[in-house]
Image: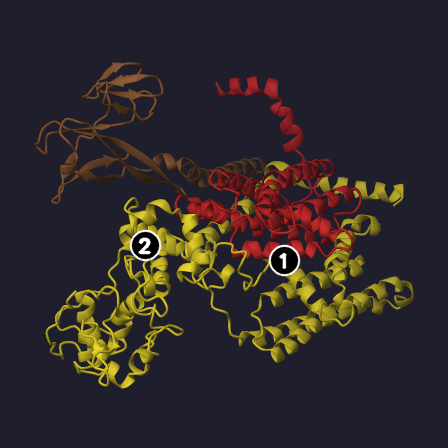
Chain colours: A yellow, B brown, C red
């Protein structure tokens, strides 16, 4: 830029300054208004949306789907699409280093590359159309990266092609044409009407890009979205989550209150002596981190399988932490358990009230039965994880749960009467349940009422039967 | 509105906005910073100490227990201890001393030979009632004033976190 | 009485001179688009303040990072607010800085005599993104851990020196306590120091050349 042009620019600016305003208070006032608006937006976001809780980092859990922060998503998607290109798609660094590097380089050197003195948009068609295309591409790639993942290979292939067209090829074509127009502008712009050509190309191309993104989005709307597991954040939530996990995974050997000293009812470990895990011997001497290792790695020599993902189990770091929280606060007398964590298993039954599976039976079964009566365990194939399973599974399925019949197997074994094998009168077909410890009278009462009422599933069905059944007296099992 | 009035208004408005942002961020922040000092941490419990029948009359019987302190996300256990002195066969006639030296909190030990409590840190000496016999401590050994005996003969002391 | 206090301070601090030089300056007719720059500065100050308060309770070690963040969210009075503002402020700052850059591009304010201001601005943009990247790891949850694993992996694809860069970023071959520690150090003072320095020069240049006027046909 020559000195004469610089002089003109400076003089122009002087004129603008003279007919302008003052920094203080005019500019600063505008700045403060915008700052206040931003501040209020942040307060609203922090209060009403907050930060989504996530599980603790677990280096062993490689099944987690990593996603970067939103402002990197466009790069993320660009890399994914670039990888689809045959041959050069394999050369990763072209996409990870060259293209972004080129972008940042051009951006940095912009004032040195664009030395023309013109600032009005009418004289900057190339710059504005080029930048507009790039920014639109970034926005659309970000949108595409936020969509749910296609469920099968065919859909994935189709979606990827559409995304590549909209996010990679069309923008690349537009940019190439724009650069071509710019380089050969002296030849092309003889006729003044052709000056609008780059604008048209950009507009049409942008519409195509947006349309392609819309198509991809509409297709993605029908994909199944992976369920996000709830993460327990407060201490009470963690204890309750830990209690549920303990009920399913640990009760089988350790009992619902951790007091089992001799294992019963577990295949391969019958009669094994263990230290009760609710004892002070264990709780006072084993720290939380040691307990974590025991649960994660297991005790293979003693027969305890690993539960941590790092060793082939199914529990995440957070889940094992929750189990430990439950054990500490429930059984370690040095800790005071928060009152909200001591909730009754099910709402107490009024006179004449009929319990339902959903509200009353399911929590009892989850706490005391599912540990054994789930797939893969020694349980005569009698599963209890759902309503249907309780009524219809098992080797003795015709005998387990029969409405209004006191000879049903389930109602007998929970009240302390084992079922003997008719062919071998000294052999137990079904032992007393639970094998270790007995259900409390109110839980037995709930089962009795439930079976007498015909096993209603939902709360509404149970409410309709209110007061319609006569209960036979509940027998407390002899210890 | 003349130029000057407008300017004054904008100056005032700017000051108000600035002050508002500072207050809305500042006040919760003060609560945030001093939060641990505002907490009520007094916790109380009845601690079982041992069967009364196992404690001979006249001779100090040592006992100890652990408590867990929660500070933020850290759980640490601290141990405490003391001596039970039965003055007679009467289960209510007890003196229960805290074994933390009142000088700088070392643990004192009962010396059966000298019939005193000795502190190994700075040679403090306490008598049978916990009174200071010699050395730097400013006051007698603390006592666990409240105690009870359960139905199966276990002595329990009332512990309150300071 | 207040006039006396003011005069005493003015004689020593030069408050009136500060006012004349810094505040009482002419600017072109204001455009609300021009507020994006100061909005970025406001967000930087807000992030700095909330960030400093977060370090009162946060521990940058894999053993305690997650639990300390949980304590801030559940245990400390208004901890959820401080963290919430910091979390959303980070995203908002990247967005506002980016839009500010676009505005400067569209109004061609990067041209003579403001080329250096633009250059510094790109440095600010990259450093802001660096702040976002390093800060993202600190809660040490699944999202943070695996996103950083992939991010540093991508950095490792640079030809020849990629593995070296990866090891420098991670403090070793894997994501570990060393990674968390150096990301924390970069996030709380190395990058903020760079930001503060660049902002200083950026502001000086803006005051020297004045805010650019909105271009008209004449430009």
Is residue B162 shown to the viewer in this render?
Answer: no
Q: Is residue A399 above or below residue A8?
A: below
Which sits in the foreground, A230 or B53? B53
- Location of residue A78 in the rendering, given as x and y in whole percent from the top left corner: 69, 64
The quadrant holding residue C187 is: top right
2 or 1: mark nearer the eye: 2
Q: Is residue A164 above or below residue B121?
A: below
Q: Are marks 2 and 1 on the same chain?
A: no
Which chain is home to disc 2?
A
**Residue bearing mark 2:** A275
Q: Locate residue A124, reporting x and y percent.
A: 79, 57
Q: The N terminus of chain B is located in which quarter? A: top right
Q: Position of residue C62 (x, y in %)?
A: 52, 47
In the displayed orientation, state which residue is furthest to the top: B134
Residue B130 or residue A208, whichever sits in front: B130
Quarter of the figure with the C terminus of chain B: top left
Q: Which mark is residue C150?
A: 1
Disc number for residue C17: none
Query: How many dots with numbers?
Result: 2
Residue A443 visible somewhere in the drawing: yes
């Amino acid at each position: 830029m020559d000195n004469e042009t610089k002089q003109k620019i400076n003089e122009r600016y002087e004129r603008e300054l003279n007919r302008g305003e003052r920094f203080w208070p005019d500019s600063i006032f505008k700045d403060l208004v915008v700052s206040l608006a931003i501040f209020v937006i942040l307060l609203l976001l922090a209060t009403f949306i907050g930060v989504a809780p996530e599980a603790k980092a677990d280096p062993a859990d490689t099944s987690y789907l990593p996603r970067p922060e939103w402002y990197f998503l466009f790069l993320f998607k660009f890399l994914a699409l670039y990888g689809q290109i045959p041959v050069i798609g394999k050369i990763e660094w072209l996409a990870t280093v060259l293209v972004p590097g080129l972008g940042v380089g051009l951006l940095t050197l912009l004032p040195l590359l664009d030395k023309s003195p013109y600032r009005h948009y009418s004289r900057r068609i190339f710059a504005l159309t080029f930048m507009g295309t790039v920014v639109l591409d970034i926005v659309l790639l970000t949108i595409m990266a936020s969509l749910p993942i296609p469920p099968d290979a065919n859909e994935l292939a189709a979606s990827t092609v559409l995304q590549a067209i909209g996010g990679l090829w069309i923008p690349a074509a537009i940019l190439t044409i724009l650069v071509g127009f710019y380089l050969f502008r002296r030849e092309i712009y003889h006729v003044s009407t052709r000056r609008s050509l780059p604008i048209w190309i950009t507009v049409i191309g942008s519409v195509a890009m947006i349309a392609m993104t819309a198509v991809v989005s509409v297709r993605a709307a029908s994909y199944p979205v992976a369920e996000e597991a709830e993460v327990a954040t407060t201490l009470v939530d963690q204890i309750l989550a830990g209690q549920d996990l303990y009920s399913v995974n640990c009760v089988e050997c350790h009992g619902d209150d951790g007091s089992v000293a001799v294992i019963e009812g577990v295949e391969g470990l019958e009669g094994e002596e263990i230290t009760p895990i609710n004892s002070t011997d264990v709780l006072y001497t084993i720290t939380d981190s040691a307990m974590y290792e025991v649960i994660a790695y297991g005790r293979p020599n003693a027969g305890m399988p690993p539960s941590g993902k790092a060793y082939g189990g199914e529990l995440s770091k957070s889940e094992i932490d929750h189990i430990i929280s439950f054990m500490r606060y429930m059984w370690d007398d040095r800790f005071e358990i928060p009152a909200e964590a001591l909730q009754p298993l099910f709402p107490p039954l009024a006179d004449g009230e009929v319990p339902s599976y959903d509200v009353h039976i399911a929590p009892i079964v989850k706490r005391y039965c599912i540990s054994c009566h789930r797939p893969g365990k020694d349980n005569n194939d009698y599963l209890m994880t759902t309503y249907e399973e309780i009524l219809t599974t098992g080797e003795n399925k015709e005998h387990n749960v029969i409405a209004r019949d006191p000879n049903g197997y389930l109602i007998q074994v929970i009240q302390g009467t084992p079922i003997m094998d008719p062919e071998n009168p000294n052999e137990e077909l079904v032992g007393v349940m639970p094998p270790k410890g007995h259900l409390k009278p109110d839980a037995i009462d709930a089962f009795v009422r439930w079976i007498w009422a015909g096993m209603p599933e939902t709360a509404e069905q149970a409410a309709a039967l209110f007061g319609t059944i006569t209960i036979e007296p509940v027998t407390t099992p002899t210890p | 509105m003349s130029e000057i009035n407008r300017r004054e208004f904008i100056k005032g408005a700017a000051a108000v906005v600035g002050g508002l942002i500072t207050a809305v961020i500042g006040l919760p922040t003060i609560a945030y910073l001093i939060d641990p000092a505002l907490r009520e941490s007094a916790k109380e419990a009845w601690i079982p100490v041992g069967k009364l029948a196992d404690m001979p009359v006249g001779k100090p019987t040592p006992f100890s227990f652990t408590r867990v302190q929660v500070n933020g996300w850290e759980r640490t256990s601290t141990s405490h201890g003391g001596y039970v002195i039965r003055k007679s066969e009467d289960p209510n006639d007890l003196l229960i001393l805290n074994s933390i030296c009142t000088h700088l909190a070392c643990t004192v030990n009962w010396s059966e030979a000298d019939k005193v409590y000795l502190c190994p840190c700075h040679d403090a000496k306490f008598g049978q009632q916990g009174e200071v016999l010699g050395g730097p401590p400013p006051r007698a050994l603390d006592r666990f004033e409240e105690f009870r005996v359960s139905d199966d003969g276990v002595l329990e002391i009332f512990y309150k976190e300071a | 009485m207040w006039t006396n206090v003011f005069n005493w301070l003015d004689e020593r601090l030069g408050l009136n001179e500060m006012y004349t030089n810094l505040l009482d300056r002419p600017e072109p007719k204001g455009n609300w688009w021009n507020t994006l720059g100061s909005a970025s500065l406001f967000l930087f100050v807000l992030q700095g303040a909330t960030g400093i308060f977060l370090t009162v309770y946060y521990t940058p070690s894999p053993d305690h990072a997650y639990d300390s963040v949980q304590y801030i969210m559940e245990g400390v009075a208004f901890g959820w607010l401080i963290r919430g503002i910091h979390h959303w402020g980070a995203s908002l700052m990247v967005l506002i800085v980016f839009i500010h850059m676009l505005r400067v591009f569209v109004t061609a304010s990067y041209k003579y005599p403001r080329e250096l201001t633009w250059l510094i601005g790109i440095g600010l943009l990259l450093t802001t993104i660096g702040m976002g990247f390093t800060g993202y790891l600190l809660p040490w949850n699944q999202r943070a851990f695996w996103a950083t694993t992939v991010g540093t992996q991508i950095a490792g694809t640079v030809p020849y020196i990629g593995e070296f860069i990866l090891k420098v970023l991670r403090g070793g071959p894997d994501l570990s306590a060393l990674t968390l520690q150096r990301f924390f150090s970069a996030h709380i003072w190395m990058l903020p120091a760079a930001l503060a320095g660049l902002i200083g020069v950026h502001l000086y240049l803006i005051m020297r050349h004045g805010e650019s006027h909105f271009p008209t046909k004449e430009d």
